[in-house]
Image (spheres, helix red, strand yellow):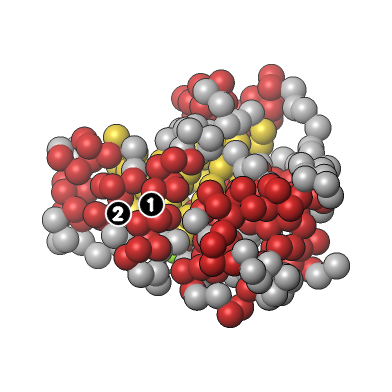
Amino acid sequence: MIAGVNRFLVPRFPAVNERARTVEAVAAGVSAAGASALARTARAGTGVAVDGLRVRFGAREVVHGVTVGFHAHRVTALIGPTGCGKTTVLRALNRLHDGRPGVHISGSVRIGDEEVYDPRADVRDLRRRIGMLFQRPNPFPLSIRENIALAARIHGLWSRQDAAERTEAILREVGLWEAVRDRLGQAPFLLSGGQQQLLCLARALAVEPDVLLLDEPTSSLDPGTTARIEELISALRDKMTIIIVTHNLQQARRVADEVCLLLDGEVVEQAPADRFFQAPADERSRAYVDGRVG
Ligand SMILES: Nc1ncnc2c1ncn2[C@@H]1O[C@H](COP(=O)(O)OP(=O)(O)OP(=O)(O)O)[C@@H](O)[C@H]1O
Ligand SMILES: [Mg+2]
């Protein structure tokens, strides 16, 4: 088994006592207002509630106490100039900083009613529940078929009998079936960049995530594939919570229900997309939308 796939091999983590979690969150320094926001988000489904998140690389703190809610069944665009901490925040949501030397994280991240940084949390299962797509596609060095089906089978979501049918269905869903139907047994690296990104999206969807993190997923893609991915994002919001980092404000207008602007590691404003773009509450948001910042 290759190391990159191994992290998907997990049982689900056990159900959690909500009240105990709240007590722990408060004990961990989560504000009372934060705790009630967390409870609301938790009740609404599998949204993601971030409270007082700080990330430090060595001596340098780059995320300074971010509190933000990513609502279930909505698309939130996380925007802001280069270096403001968008990727750092996104990676903190599914613990991708774990094990990196010199990285210090504090605060609370909850998915539904579960604390992501609870020492008892099963990180591999967490990453099944919180899928991620990066700027550059990263298919596994396995066949196209196994890229899609392996983790789903290991998680017990697909049986050996129905794997072929479900692989086809998911490849059809992302619009890749016709391109790969005759080469399912081949490695994915001869696919175009856009096709590889669609394959990675199909792989993320196969394990039925509750949350999808997208870090500039279309920045290196052609307009056709970009449109396809935007259509999928819009369709997928019925099933999951979606957070997309993008520098493309037109894309944020097209796909986002909510917008969150980050500047220098702090949240400046979070608002419904219409309001954010038409009448932002903060002058810095106006400046960013007008192209006067970043
Ligand atoms: N592993 C790391 N070690 C040290 N500093 C880091 C590390 N990762 C990120 N940083 C720093 O943290 C800050 C935020 O980086 P981050 O990648 O989160 O920005 P971003 O908003 O995603 O930018 P971009 O839009 O360019 O992708 C930057 O100053 C970056 O140099
Ligand atoms: Mg980034």
In depth, the one of 147 and 64 nearer the eye is 147
Tag 2–tag 1 contact (CB < 8 Å): yes
The quarter in which the C terminus is drawn is: bottom left
Foreground pick, 25 / 257: 257
Determine whether the residue tagged by mark 2 lies in a helix, strand or loop: helix
Q: Secondary structure at mark 1?
A: helix
Residue shown at 74% from the left, 67% from the top = 4
Q: Which mark is residue 264?
A: none
Q: Quadrant of residue 22?
A: top right
The structure residue drawn at horizontal position 49% and vertical position 74%, both measured from the top left corner, is 193
Task: Tell me the kind of residue under disc 1.
Answer: Glu
Label annotation for residue 251: 2
Which quarter of the rendered picture does the N terminus lie within? bottom right
Q: What is the x, y in percent for residue 40?
A: 51, 22
Residue position marked by numbered label 1 in the rendering: 230
Q: Nearer the viewer, mark 2 or mark 1?
A: 1
Query: Compared with residue 175, is residue 113 higher up or lower down, i.e. above or below?
Result: above
Mark-to-mark CA distance, 2 and 1: 8 Å
Q: Position of residue 122 (x, y in %)?
A: 77, 45
Give the image quarter of residue 118: top right
Q: In the displayed structure, does residue 191 sit left or right of residue 76?
A: right
Residue 286 is at least partly visible in this image: yes
| Residue 121 drawn at (x, y percent) | 75, 42
What kind of residue is marked 2? Gln
Q: Is residue 276 above or below residue 38?
A: below
The answer to whether residue 139 is above or below residue 36 is below
Tell whether 172 sits left or right of 272.
right
In percent of the image, x 68 and y 75: which residue is there? 187
